[in-house]
Amino acid sequence: MSDEEIIRLLREHDEAALDEITKKYRNYCYTVFLNVLSNEADCEECMNDLLMHLFAADVREVQSLRQYLGAAARNVAYDRYKTNMRLKRNENQCEAFDELEATFSAEDVENAVENRELSRAINSFLRSLDKRERVLFIRRYYFLESTKKLSAEFDLSCGAVLRRLSRTRIKLKDYLLKEGFQI
């Protein structure tokens, strides 16, 4: 079934859409969940939460189902992550959030998702980066991949990955200040 047909079924609140999403995008969603949670046991619960969210969501504006699912899956996993962190801290993800919070206040990081203007500015900044720098930044801070995994895939030392990410965060902060954002 095509993504357009699945979106149409979601708009009609037809449960068949959820079955199709599970068939077509389960592995993709699990990858997103695992990047945030690093725990396979939570994935099934996250998938159920995602499907409930999708069934209740207003999908009139959705144009790319894959992108929408990726963002929604990340949000569901992040909610699960916050719940898990109340019980037990996960070092890799905490490091990624701590790195970003060193650039922004914690309040800014949480509000960034809701602030369209800030999101547009960040997207503009990311488009200005060379591809390798952009992919590294997105995989670390959006998909929450470990620096160890990134260093292996980019053929860099962990220290080199950390230095590149640090320089990119500084550039982002400077860019946002230049654009008039209070950091």
Image: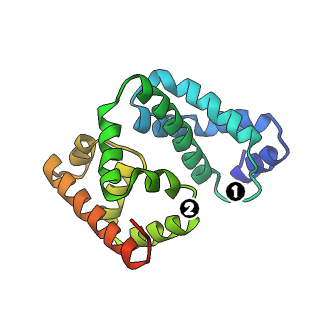
Q: Secondary structure at mark 2?
A: loop
Q: Are marks 1 and 2 in contact (CB under 8 Å)?
A: no
- Horizontal relation, residue 164 to residue 31: left or right: left
- Give the residue drawn at x 41%, y 50%: 106
How far is the residue under mark 1 from the one under mark 2?
18 Å
- Give the residue drawn at x 71%, y 49%: 2
- Horizontal relation, residue 181 to residue 95: left or right: right
- Classed neighbour count for the residue bearing mark 2: other residues with Cα under 10 Å, few (<14), some (14–19), many (≥20): few
Q: Secondary structure at mark 1?
A: loop
Vertical placement of 94 versus 118: above or below?
Answer: above
Q: Amino acid at mark 2?
A: Asn
Quadrant of res 15: top right
Residue 157 visible, this orientation: no
Q: Position of residue 129 (x, y in %)?
A: 34, 71
What residue is disc 2 on? 115
Nearest the viewer among 85 and 27 is 85
Vertical placement of 35 versus 71: above or below?
Answer: above
What residue is disc 1 on? 62
Nearest the viewer among 135 and 108 is 108
Q: Looking at the image, which residue sits at the far right?
A: 12
Q: Position of residue 99 (x, y in %)?
A: 29, 50
Nearest the viewer among 67 and 3 is 67
Residue 111 visible, this orientation: yes
Q: Amino acid at mark 1?
A: Val
Q: Position of residue 84 (x, y in %)?
A: 45, 26
Nearest the viewer among 96 and 25 is 96
- Classed neighbour count for the residue bearing mark 1: other residues with Cα under 10 Å, few (<14), some (14–19), many (≥20): some
Quadrant location, the C terminus: bottom left
